[in-house]
Amino acid sequence: MHQAPALLEAATAAAAKAYAPYSRFQVGCALVTAQGNLFTGCNVENASYGLTICAERGTIFQAVAAEGPEMRIAELAVIALGHEFPPCGACRQVIAEFADAETPVWFLRDGKPVRLTMAELLPASFKL
């Protein structure tokens, strides 16, 4: 599928909508499902930090709410305005729940798109 430019652009637009008054760390996510639907989301912070929702998890939860429990991620991108990083560990585990080992995950490094598979991002994901 490899929709990196469009997904990174959609994730950037989502990041601009983040509610991040405490960290000022605005993160956006965009994903395409196996059904071909695009979902975007941003992080939403809370004064009680543990209640904060990461962009990736919020986006995935939206996709599940729309498509149901069989939703599968075909491709995902994450952007943090002013920063470059892959998804955090908690988000990697949630992505893995709805992705295959070869699902591409995009982010920026040195201003350039980086593509890693879920197997590369989380080689030993927790499974029941």
Image: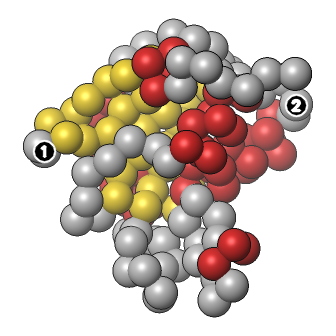
Image coordinates for residue 58, horizontal then vertical, percent: 66, 55
Q: Residue at x 38, y 42 (%)?
A: 86
Closer to us: 47 or 74: 47
Image coordinates for residue 20, horizontal then vertical, percent: 48, 79
Examine the rendering and report whether any part of residue 21 can be seen: yes
Q: Residues within 10 Å of mark 1 (few under 14, many from 20)?
A: few
Q: Is residue 92 left or right of residue 81?
A: right
Q: Is residue 21 left or right of residue 50?
A: left
Image coordinates for residue 110, horizontal then vertical, percent: 11, 43
Note whether 84 is above or below 121 in the view shown: below
Q: Residue at x 52, y 79 (%)?
A: 19
Note whether 116 is above or below 94 in the view shown: above
Q: Earlier in the sequence, mark 1 or mark 2?
A: 2
Please identify the quarter of the rendering in which residue 4 is found: top left
User: Residue 111, which numbered label?
Assistant: 1
User: Residue 69, which numbered label?
Assistant: 2
